[in-house]
Image (cartoon, rainbow, N blue to C red):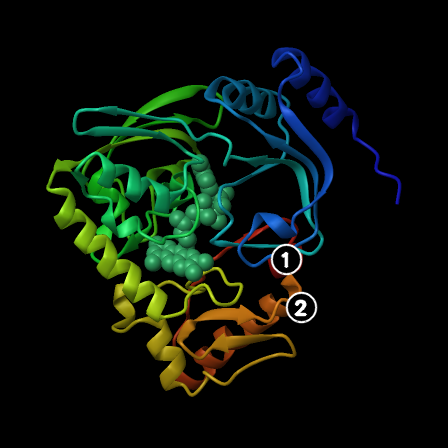
Amino acid sequence: MVFQLSPKEAKFLKLVQTKTDGKLEIKKNLSLGAYSTYQTGGRARIAVFPKNIDQALILFKLIRDLDLEFTVIGGGSNILISDRGINGITVMLTGLAAFEIKGQLLGVEAGFSSHKLAHLALEQGLSGLEFLTQLPGSIGGAIYMNARAFGGEISKVIHSALVVDSSGSQLEYRNQPGDFSYKRSPFKLKDQIILKAYFKLITEGKSKIREEMDRIQQTRLAKQERKYPSCGCVFKNRRDLGKPAGKIIDEAGLKSLHTENARVYESHANFIVHNGRADSQEIRNLMELVKTKVRQLEGIELEYEVEFVGDWSEYQ
Ligand SMILES: Cc1cc2nc3c(=O)[nH]c(=O)nc-3n(C[C@H](O)[C@H](O)[C@H](O)COP(=O)(O)OP(=O)(O)OC[C@H]3O[C@@H](n4cnc5c(N)ncnc54)[C@H](O)[C@@H]3O)c2cc1C
């Protein structure tokens, strides 16, 4: 199939190259299998890889000015990418990975690995980010999703952030009580992109921090969470459900549910894993089946935590 740019896409590419002195990495018709932990999905028409905040600001301003469709991907650990791929511009943020330390404030760009950030804080004797140990993905994605684990949560430690708003302008955000809630960040609600964030941490002995990180690491490894491709929890563990979504799925007798290549994970019923040969549609089919069966058997409407990226128009 011949790949043809729309006039708007061609204009975007020309302008973005001029404004970044030709330094922005751009890939056309990029196969996306390597960009999510599910390792599935089609192609991105145009993928861009900013390497610093200046490039990212130029990029998002142009995207907004030209009113182009766009998708942001961090570590790809909470998404399922459509087999039909992603239209418009796909912005890959893992190249934004600089950091700075100002006393108890740790500043980090959005593409920085969450797991590595826990280790960076440890090296500085700063406590508060231990819960990010072995959490897949980037810190930008963790902030956007208000990631939580082992009693820790992004909302409890984030101090401020540099974001791009819906007009393409940069904005400074200061954390206010009530801005975050379960799996919700103000950025998700306002369609903002996080470029950098500061975390307010506490000075602590390294051995104490390391002990907690080791405990988390052991627990995660014991659960074999990363043995098969997955997106972590498929459904939200909403408090009003009274119990975790995995328990509901398990109690409904759905742990053995599977398709040819995908299955409800025997170690954790809220994970749907596959054997490396499923495509996104097969995984989505199984997700929908679990959702329908839980509704029929338990009268409970599960809500997706996973974000569906790309063209899933048949489900809207
Ligand atoms: C094995 C496994 C275990 C997991 N365990 C946990 C857990 O214990 N707790 C938990 O909370 N999650 C867990 N997850 C889910 C996931 O790791 C987290 O939500 C993670 O923080 C997502 O980050 P990411 O960079 O991979 O985001 P992505 O998957 O790349 O993106 C997720 C969403 O965030 C948006 N996004 C990404 N970066 C930005 C940005 N800079 N600005 C604005 N929007 C952005 C994307 O557009 C998308 O909508 C797990 C996943 C796996 C695979």
Question: Horizontal and vertical percent for residue 27?
Answer: 70, 33
Q: Is residue 305 visible in this depiction of the protein?
A: no
Question: Horizontal and vertical percent for residue 145?
Answer: 38, 47
Q: Amino acid at mark 2?
A: Arg
Helix, strand or loop at mark 1? loop
Q: Is residue 110 above or below residue 248?
A: above
How would you rate the neighbour count of disc 1 (Cα within 10 Å): few for under 14, some for 14-19, many for 20 or more?
many
The label shown at residue 127 is none
- In the picture, measured across the screen, residue 61 lies left or right of residue 108, that is right
Residue at the image point whose x is 49% and y is 76% from the top: 264
Q: Amino acid at mark 1?
A: Thr
Quickly name the residue at label 2: 277
Of residue 185 and residue 108, the one placed in the foreground of this image is 108
State the CA–CA distance, disc 2 to disc 1. Answer: 9 Å
Report the quarter where the C terminus lies.
bottom right
Question: Outermost residue, front direction?
Answer: 207
Label tally: 2
Q: In the figure, residue 186 lies in which quadrant?
A: top left
Quickly name the residue at label 1: 40
Question: Horizontal and vertical percent for residue 99?
Answer: 35, 27
- In the picture, measured across the screen, residue 265 lies left or right of residue 152, that is right
